[in-house]
Image (cartoon, rainbow, N blue to C red):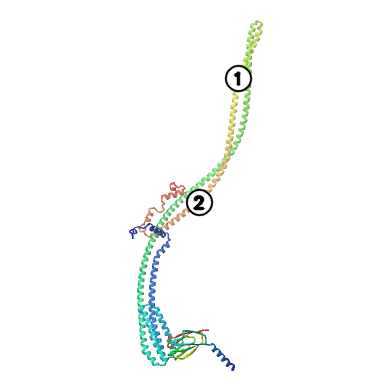
Amino acid sequence: MPPSAHVSETPATSGKWQAWRFGLTHLSLPVKFYLALLPLLIMGGLVIYVADQSLRSNSQELIAARRIKELAITSQCLLLQQDDATKVMLIDMLNPDASQRKIAAYDACQKTFDRLKQLTKAPQVLGLIQQMEEMDDKQLQPIDTRVLEAMGNGNADQARKIYFQEYEPLRKQYESVMRQLGDEAEKMATQAARTMDENNHRSLHHIALTLGGGMLLVALIMLAVVRHVGSRLRATAAVIEREAAATLNSSVFMSASGKNLADASSAIATSLQQTGQSLAKMATETKRNAEISGNAKEFTNQARATAEKGSAELHVLTDALDNIKSSADSISKIIKTIDEIAFQTNILALNAAVEAARAGEAGLGFAVVADEVRNLARRCAEASKETGERIQDSVKKTNSGVEIGHHVAKNFDEIAEKIRRMDEFASEIAAISHSQSDGFVQINSAVAQIDAATQNNAAGVEQSASASRELNSQAASLKQAVEELKLLIEGTRKRTGVPDRDSVALDAQPPGTPSPKRATSIKAKIAGTIPSSSRN
Amino acid sequence: MNKSLLFSIAAFISVAAFAEDHVIKQEDRQFSAQEITVKPGDKLVFTNCDSVTHNVFSTSDANPFTIKVQKPGEATAVEFKDEGVTEVRCAIHPKMKITVTVKK
């Protein structure tokens, strides 16, 4: 075998071993125990089978030896019966009972020979049996026949002579052989008993060795199984304990969170109730606001109509002022014409005065008329000038009025426009108020639903708190069960201060304290805010 | 009276006419047959052809009989009436054996 075979396993062998080990690992515990008992059962069965075969053989030999001895004795008895019948027939040849007994003993003796030959294969014993059979068949029976034939021929003396001189010595010799056969049978029995005793001792030794070896093997297998199962149980118990502690901590945390949540829910419910009342009040006010907005819209409409009417009238006024201005302009032109006429008249008066002066006396009257005309022209000019000025002033004022009228009309238009905008705003406000009113109704309904949901949440939180308390109790029970399981696995080892590997690992983390990461995860799950690092 | 006598004679004649005799010889200290089947009422005629005496008898409950001493040359008829198996032996020669089966 190559050295590597002792050092390492080939990959195929390792794979097979792993597959086999995997298969064993996944077997159930009862099956493992049964498998552990299997070698003992097989070995015990083999030993019992071998011992049974040996004992059966020995007992058969012993029984055969005893039977041979019995049959040898029986054969001797049968020979004596035949001899007895022959003796009777020597006295009374016609004795029917003797004939019957003789034939019956003869037949039984022949059967005995056959049974003797079937009982053993030992050469020495078989030789004795054959010797007896030959003596009976070839010596005793012929002599016995000669005796009886002599008797039947009426020669009793010859018959007795043959009997005593030939038959009796041969019968004694035959009995000697039978005794040898009995002795051989006794030797066989003794030997068989001795062999059986030796075999019994050997079988006991084998059984003891096998049972010892088997029990040792079973103990080793059981030890391995128990170590394996114990290891897995310890690991499982550690996991259960850790999870139970985490569950307990989580349940405590959930209980506290539930209480906080219940308080928060109660506060939310109160706030919602107040919010509902406020919303109802606001809805009423909004509704009132909508009504007022409607009224404002109506009034705004009226104001807009009035403003539009005022604006129209102002336009009429400005038109009138324009007409006045036009009239004033016309009058001004007329007055200018009158002024020009007065100027021409004045010039004409001057010319007339000049002419009158030239005319002398004759022209005095004319001069006076010319003067008067000149005065009239001057007065006319003054009047037209004054009228023109006034008309100019009036025109100026009319222009100013027209401008003011336009300005006022423009203002009125702006007012009307703004009132229209206000009307639109009022309409929008009214629409918004209606919409707000509807929204408040919906909000009220939503708040009522939220209130109901909050009440349900509060009830759920109470149930959750109850479940958390129950979970606390269950976690405590689970912890107790884990302690009992550890006690079952480890016995009193921990109490004696000999911690094992797993318990050291467990003790490194205080019972009931989840890992920081797990605690964060639990809290985050409860708070609904799982950190991104945990999510990753 | 005459009628009864005639009837008895007729019956005897009829039985004698139906019954059969079977001869069994005894030679060299053996029966001439090892077994034989006969009808009820048949007879076996044991004939001693040996030079020695025989003592033939029945070892069975059916058809018990014993011839006792039968000298050489003697013949003895034995009727087998009962149905069944009868073993016949010789008290002087135990090896001699014949099985007689009686059936209809």
The three-letter code of the residue at mark 1 reads Gln
- Please tell me the numbered disc located at residue A392: 1
Q: Name the residue under label 2.
A: A460
Between residues A253 and A31, which one lies in front from this camera angle?
A31
Q: In which quarter of the image is residue A488?
A: bottom left
Between residues B93 and A455, which one lies in front from this camera angle?
B93
Can the viewer see residue B25 in this picture?
A: yes
Q: How crowded is mark 1: few (under 14 residues within 10 Å), some or many (20 or more)?
A: some
Q: Which residue is drawn at 62% across and 26% down?
A: A317
Q: Looking at the image, tell me whether mark 1 or mark 2 is earlier in sequence order.
A: 1
Q: Nearer the viewer, mark 1 or mark 2?
A: 1
Q: In which quarter of the image is residue A445?
A: top right
Task: Give the image location of residue A143, x and y in percent.
Answer: 39, 88
Note whether A270 is above or below B76 in the view shown: above
Return the residue found at the far top.
Answer: A361
Return the residue found at the far left.
Answer: A3
Quadrant where the N terminus of chain A is found in the figure: bottom left
Task: Give the image location of residue A104, x and y in percent.
Answer: 43, 85
- How far apart are the alpha carbons under marks 1 and 2? 95 Å
Between residues A281 and B80, which one lies in front from this camera angle?
B80
Task: Give the image location of residue A394, x and y in percent.
Answer: 61, 21
Q: Which residue is drawn at 36% across and 69% down?
A: A208
Secondary structure under the numbered disc 2 in the rendered image: helix
Secondary structure under the numbered disc 1 in the rendered image: helix
The three-letter code of the residue at mark 2 reads Gly
Can the viewer see residue A487 in this picture?
A: no
Q: Residues within 10 Å of mark 2 (few under 14, many from 20)?
A: some
The chain containing the residue under callout 1 comes to A
In the image, is A412 to the left or to the right of A84?
Answer: right
Q: Quadrant of residue A129?
A: bottom left
